[in-house]
Amino acid sequence: MADKSKDPKMTPIAKTLNKVENRLAQGANCGSVAEGLANVAKASELLSSVWTLPPGQLLRFHHDVDVATVNGGATPGFDGNKEDAERFIAISSSEIARYQRLMYANGVKGSHHRLLIVLQGMDASGKGGIVRHVFSQGDPMGMHYHGFGAPKGEELDHDYLWRIKRELPANGWISIFDRSHYEDIVMPRIYKTQPEEVWQSRYDEINRFESQLASDGCTIIKIFLVVSKEEQKRHFLSRLEDSTKYWKFDPSDLEARARWDEYMAAWQDVFLRTSTDQAPWYLVPADNRWYSRAVVSELLRNTLRNMNMIWPPLEVDADEMRRQLETM
């Protein structure tokens, strides 16, 4: 059979993806579980080589970065096209599913490893699409999604973190937040619904809260999807022109758009004051959905791989269990 990776018409990224698929196919014949896990890890490392620099390095927030100047249409670290990115996502998603099952199995046996993904961004930045695409091959058993809107009902009777704590991942689980506790800083700041001393105190409260989570085994990835005003406008117009998207349009989105600069200033302060070693922020250009989805997939897969998990050992005498089964 001809080696497709040697096709001169094939892009470098496509050739690398072929090699990853070949390695994963070979892994199906590994002689032991340990060997299989090692093969998957090597395949994941090879998959990461499609990036010229790791997204975790390129897109992590640093104090000299201004969110208002981030180019939403850029694709830093990825020299491929949409087709390359979608193929990357498909392969990466299958590996995420492997690691997710591994983390879930360990959680059942008492491991505190778990993962919280916080997705933030202006309206029409693609948060929902990331959830659908990156986790399309995940196992629902072990994954939890929650979207946070304005507090209402019982939520108003409690501290702002009360509803957040209710949705945190259990041991071995992944929780994905579409908006989060950070809205409880940004929204009162912009709309002046609470005194300044109230929302100002929340930066430190959230840092302490996330530090406690991390110390207890919860890994936190915080992602802000940077969409340009031009791209947001295009999506808003498409929602008004397509009857299947009417439900997505809310007049309040236009009010937020009119306050764009205020939002950027508020989020900049959030990044400056809450991007920590234990819970960093990543600013991901999101005009090209295929790029932002590929970035999130890469961040997630590497995070899970770096947990260095193994399958839990059998805690009973297998021979004895077999003998008992023979008598039943």
Image: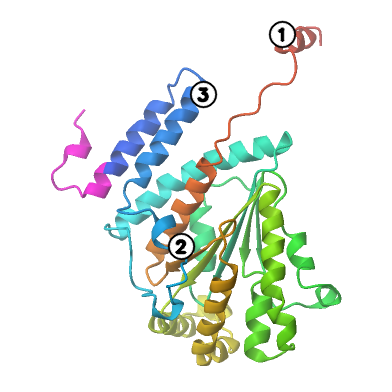
Q: Residues within 10 Å of mark 1 (few under 14, many from 20)?
A: few
Against 67, is 60 above or below? Answer: above
Q: Position of residue 187 (x, y in %)?
A: 65, 83
Q: Which residues are magenta?
A: 1-15
What's the residue at 58%, 78% (across, down)?
247
Nearer mark to the viewer, of 3 and 2: 2
Visible in this render: residue 259?
Answer: yes
Q: Position of residue 108 (x, y in %)?
A: 72, 36
Seen from this angle, which residue lies furthest left?
A: 8
What's the residue at 66%, 46% (across, down)?
142
What's the residue at 58%, 42% (across, down)?
100
Q: Position of residue 96 (x, y in %)?
A: 51, 45
Left or right? Give the position of 17 relative to 99: left
Q: Which residue is mark 1?
A: 319
Q: Which mark is residue 34?
A: 3
Q: Which residue is mark 2?
A: 60
Q: Which mark is residue 258?
A: none
